[in-house]
Amino acid sequence: MKIERITLSRYRWERPLPITNGMHTYSAVQHCVVRIDTDDGLTGWGIGGCKQGELEHRERFARRLIGRDPLLTEAVWAELWMPKKFGRRGFETRALASLDLALWDLKGRRAGMPVHQLLGGFRTRIPTYVAGGYYADGKGLKELQAEMAGYVERGARAVKMKVGAVPVAEDVARIRAVRRAIGPDVRLMIDANCAYRAYGAAQLARRAEDQDLFWFEEPVQPDDYDGFRRLGAATTVPLAAGENESTIFGFRDLIATQAVSILQPDARHEGITGFMKIAALAQAHGLDICPHGDQQAHLSLMAAIPNGLMIEYYPREFDPMHGRVYRHTPLLRDDGTVEVPDVPGIGAEPDEEALAPYRTGVTVIDASGTAAD
């Protein structure tokens, strides 16, 4: 079996309202679907981003995969994660990760098995947390409370809100308002998206500690390992980080701070090959995994590892394509869990008919060259 063709399709659609976190505002969703076809008729699907550098590296890597055995995922990773030639982290690893996801999906399809079973298999139902609580024009405390309480009414047993875009006192008031709205038995997490320096994060943490916060996510910049150490010593709130970390080596250094309790790798940055190594490293240090981002990329992974705590679940309010991007998107159950699709592969086959109106371009790579529109 050899890789015959790789198709990279790009999509974009607008959000009904822009969403703002502690540092950035997002008005649209961009999505790259990776399709790998083999000479014996098998197809594997992967998930990627659409930033220009990632697109360029993905095409470059895809050309190198034509004619290769798609089952040799370790060999592919070793060849393409080559810092002297391609770069150590960033767009390069994200491009490689999207191809790696498609190769693993293809493995599962060839075996006729869900990938979580190929990886060992641990469970089929995964606890979730709902990621919301963004800033928005005209969104006061009452609106924030109604939003977060609404997630609990739908079955959420854990919710996350944003902090870092307003003064500390205002964010503390927001946190207290949400805790009143969701009650004492629902886990509440806060996410700063790297908005603070360590001293500012410590101020917020100390003033909100009595709200029983389950974690404080990305309080400081991802490379500020010393900031994590100082903040970890200053608060009893567990710290979570990793969505902007990369490779097993980066997570090794994050773990070495001894300040971060929950690691948040993203399979769209690490692939399955990298993610599983990070999960094993975390397990050896007694740490839990709560992956960042697109739940579909992580369903098989979280169903395969014993130290997977929760999966991130995005509510329908922020994305008009919610539930329509993939053919097998699990819905939030009334017990706060999602069920892993019982289909071969990673369960990320796109709904191409639903996505068609939003396609902005496609690149096809095969033995004859590269064609794009």
Image (tube, helix red, strand yellow):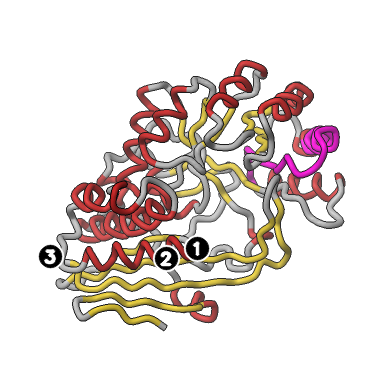
In magenta segment, residue 79: no
Under mark 3, the amino acid is Met
Q: Establish if 256 lies above or below 95.
A: above
Q: Secondary structure at mark 3?
A: loop
Q: Is residue 154 visible?
A: yes
Q: Secondary structure at mark 1?
A: loop
Under mark 1, the amino acid is Lys
Q: Residue under label 3, please give it.
A: 1
Left or right of residue 365, residue 209 in this image? right
In magenta segment, residue 166: yes
| Separation of residues labelled 3 and 2 (CA atoms) | 26 Å
Q: Residue furthest front?
A: 84
At x 66% / y 27%, what residue is drawn? 198
| Magenta stretch, residue numbers | 155-178
Is label 1 in contact with label 2 (beta carbons under 8 Å)?
Answer: yes
| Separation of residues labelled 1 and 3 (CA atoms) | 31 Å
Q: Residue under label 2, please give it.
A: 55
* Residue toward you, 240 or 304: 240
Label located before the other in sequence (1 or 3): 3
Is label 3 in contact with label 2 (beta carbons under 8 Å)?
Answer: no
At x 63% / y 39%, what residue is drawn? 194
